[in-house]
């Protein structure tokens, strides 16, 4: 535990130094570019393609900078090969923004008679490079912290749109572009439209003031959806002749000879056949089906990363409806963007409530190992945490038509 704390402090210090370096680089680059392009920015020609191209670049750089700050706070750079690679990639992203600025300022040349087609082309391919670097940085961040750390499919989706647009611009006949000026405007505005939509889907639609947003409910697997303790105890009985009842497991690290229940569960869950055959908690399948009609369901598990594929197969085989699957083993259950957490571990409940907005709620799914709730008594008293002894009780608390409490 002590070593883990030292590593955390080191990672935070490493991140702080690198963030300071990039902020200085970013400030110098943007400051000098604003001075260089002041004719466009301080006396804007609203009909100039170069003005709007620069708007696209500045919008991308600033929103990316804000997102990067949030990312490095939640997922600090680690003292590892992945951490160093990620820092280099993020520095390249800043350098790409700097390169995009002169590309954007020259877009006007593509609108001139017999203009330089490559001016607009370089601008478009610069944004392809940005999304490519986003993707690579996201992959490395996932290697450090797990699936939740980056939404790479979203990057592929919007990066693909810019890539297709760039290819179309290259192959489209020059005569068509010269005869239809609106086509050139379409290519100029494409990166800005894509970036605004990308940021909206990635994070802005989750902002508290966005109206009519569907509430997101994160549901833990073990102890909430999946009965993990009973099959492990049965396994111990068959293999080691150890007789323990589930009701006796009143602590998550309940001792069993030289080991404990937590270690035995994690060991058993590294076997694919065992994971496949684990039974669902009574009422869980119907409960999720009912919840999914009203809420957006996110499956959040802290199992070993190796089990992700098996866990998804279990969910599919048991017809569990969900929108997203995240592994929180590395990052913990802070779960940005989630409104409600259903979990059986008090530590996860506490972390979730204390690392989000004041409207967050959590439901502690009652199990023998979480009966001592003194640690979260204040959260229960404030109404931020409620306790459910069954899936019927969960539905009742979330106002989904159940009458059993």
Image (spheres, rainbow, N blue to C red):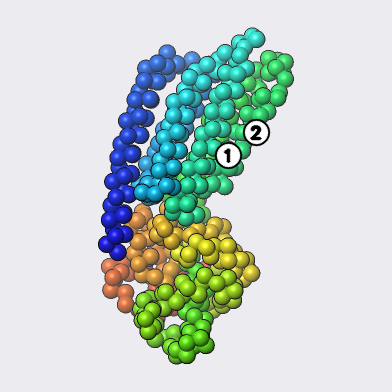
Which callout, 1 or 2, points at the residue further toward the start of the chain? 1
SS at mark 2? Answer: helix
Look at 31% across and 44% down and name the residue there.
14
The quarter of the displayed image where residue 282 is located: bottom right
- Density class for disc 2 (Cα within 10 Å; few <14, some 14-19, many ≥20) is few
- x and y, in percent, of residue 75 in the image: 39, 49
Quarter of the image for the C terminus: give it.
Answer: bottom left
Q: Is residue 298 visible?
A: no
- x and y, in percent, of residue 291 in the image: 54, 66
Please identify the residue farthest to the front as the structure is shown. 81
Say above or below: 102 vs 259.
above
Q: Is residue 17 visible?
A: yes
Say above or below: 352 vs 376.
above
- x and y, in percent, of residue 399 in the image: 49, 68
State the residue in front, 92 or 35: 92
SS at mark 1? Answer: helix
Look at 72% across and 15% down and name the residue there.
175
Look at 37% across and 49% down and name the residue there.
78
Say above or below: 30 vs 267.
above
Look at 47% across and 29% down and name the residue there.
96
| Left or right: 161 in relation to 4 | right
Measure the alpha-carbon separation of dots 1 and 2.
Answer: 10 Å
The circle drawn on residue 164 is 2
| Left or right: 112 in relation to 17 | right
State the residue in front, 15 or 59: 15
Say above or below: 271 vs 37.
below
Quarter of the image for the N terminus: give it.
Answer: bottom left
- Density class for disc 1 (Cα within 10 Å; few <14, some 14-19, many ≥20) is some
The quarter of the displayed image where residue 70 is located: top left
Residue indicated by mark 1: 158
């Amino acid at each position: 535990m002590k070593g883990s704390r030292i590593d955390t402090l080191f990672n935070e210090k490493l991140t702080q130094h690198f963030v300071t370096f990039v902020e200085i680089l970013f400030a110098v680059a943007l400051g000098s570019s604003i001075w260089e392009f002041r004719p466009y920015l301080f006396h804007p020609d609203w009909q100039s393609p170069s003005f709007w191209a620069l708007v696209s670049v500045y919008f991308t750089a600033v929103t990316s900078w804000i997102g990067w700050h949030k990312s490095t706070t939640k997922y600090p750079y680690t003292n590892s090969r992945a951490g160093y690679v990620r820092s280099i990639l993020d520095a390249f992203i800043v350098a790409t923004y700097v390169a995009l600025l002169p590309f954007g300022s020259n877009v006007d040349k593509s609108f001139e008679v017999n203009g330089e087609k490559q001016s607009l082309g370089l601008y478009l391919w610069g944004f392809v490079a940005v999304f490519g670097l986003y993707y690579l940085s996201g992959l490395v961040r996932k290697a450090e912290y797990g699936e939740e750390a980056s939404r790479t499919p979203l990057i592929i989706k919007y990066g693909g749109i810019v890539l297709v647009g760039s290819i179309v611009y290259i192959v489209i006949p020059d005569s068509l572009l010269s005869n239809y000026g609106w086509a050139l405007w379409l290519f100029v505005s494409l990166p800005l439209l894509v970036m605004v939509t990308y940021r909206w889907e990635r994070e802005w639609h989750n902002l508290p003031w966005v109206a009519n947003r569907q509430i997101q409910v994160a549901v833990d697997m073990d102890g909430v959806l999946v009965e993990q303790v009973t099959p492990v105890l049965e396994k111990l009985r068959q293999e080691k002749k150890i007789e323990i009842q589930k009701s006796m497991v009143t602590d998550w690290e309940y001792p069993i000879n030289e080991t404990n229940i937590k270690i035995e569960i994690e060991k058993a869950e590294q076997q694919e056949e065992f994971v496949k055959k684990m039974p669902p908690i009574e009422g869980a399948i119907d409960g999720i089906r009912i919840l999914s009609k009203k809420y957006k369901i996110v499956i959040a598990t802290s199992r070993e990363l190796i089990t992700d594929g098996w866990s998804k197969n279990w969910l599919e085989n048991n017809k569990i409806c969900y929108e997203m699957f995240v592994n929180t083993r590395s990052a913990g259950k802070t779960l940005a963007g989630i409104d409600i957490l259903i979990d059986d571990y008090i530590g996860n409940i506490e972390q979730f409530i204390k690392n989000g907005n004041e409207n967050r709620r959590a439901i502690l799914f009652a199990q023998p190992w979480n009966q001592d709730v003194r640690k979260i008594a204040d959260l229960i008293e404030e109404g931020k945490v409620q306790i459910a002894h069954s899936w019927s009780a969960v539905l009742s608390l979330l106002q989904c038509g159940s009458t059993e409490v």
